[in-house]
Amino acid sequence: MMVKVRAFASFREILGREKEIDMRPGSTVSDLLFELARTNRGFKDAAFDDCGRLKDYVLLMKNKKRIDPLQDLTVELTEGDEIAVFPPVAGG
Amino acid sequence: MIEITEKDFSLEEMVRMAKSNDVGAIVTFLGTVRDDEIRSMELEAYNDVARMELEAIAHEAQSRFHLKSVNIVHRVGRLDVGDNIVAIVVSAAHRDEAFMGCRHIIEELKARALIWKKEIGSSGERWVEHE
């Protein structure tokens, strides 16, 4: 199944603005993040600490709603989901 | 009016739009690019989500501070020192409500709107972190 990944700010520079990733049915948000890290060393270094934990700095949205990294990373993805990856905001 | 745009805006036009017979106070906030030893700044937004967040902030402020109107324009793209970044124009019957409402909106915008900026200087580039 295809899942869309959109990245912003520093993560856009690492991952590109937008890409589609083919994930196995039943994959979770966490699986997607590990897949991104497996295929992109820059993302692995930016998003995960030495113990393989997602850094606080990484913020996520699924279909434009915030994901709680402590609870929602095990949520299953479905075809066409849009996952956004970005650092803390700094507008104004 | 809530807008995220690459185009510059007219603060005067926004103030004109905020005027009405039941308004006694209009407060504006204009954010501009400061020369912190930078040449320019690059702003980007998760556009539709940022716009929804700005609309939510405007609605909250409108009811909490009894504002008559709220207009917000935030620019994205490449901006030079001195360029306009963001304008907030609020109107109310009285000045206290207008001042408090405008202050509330810019603080919430900075904390919540999905907008990022990168400073570009002669010695390099860096993404700005929220203060």
Image (cartoon, coloured by chain):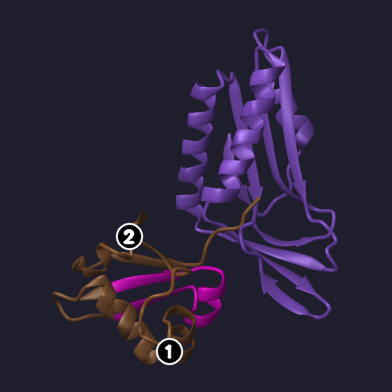
Q: Residues within 10 Å of mark 1 (few under 14, many from 20)?
A: few
Which chain is depicted purple? B
Q: Quadrant of the N terminus of chain B?
A: top right
Q: Position of residue B65 (x, y in %)?
A: 56, 22
Q: Is residue B8 above or below residue B18?
A: below
| Outermost residue toward the top in this view | B21
Task: Give the SS element for disc 1.
Answer: loop
Q: Residues within 10 Å of mark 2 (few under 14, many from 20)?
A: few
Q: Which mark is residue A40?
A: 1
Q: Which mark is residue A68?
A: 2
Magenta range: A3-21
What amino acid does circle 1 point to? Asn
Q: Position of residue A27 (x, y in %)?
A: 19, 76
Q: Check the rendered structure and report the hue given to chain A.
A: brown
**In the image, residue B97 lies in the stretch drawn in magenta:** no
Q: Chain of mark 1?
A: A
So how many labels did they put on this image? 2
Q: Quadrant of the C terminus of chain B?
A: bottom right
Nearer the camera: disc 1 or disc 2: 2
Q: Chain of mark 2?
A: A
Q: Is residue A18 left or right of residue A1?
A: right
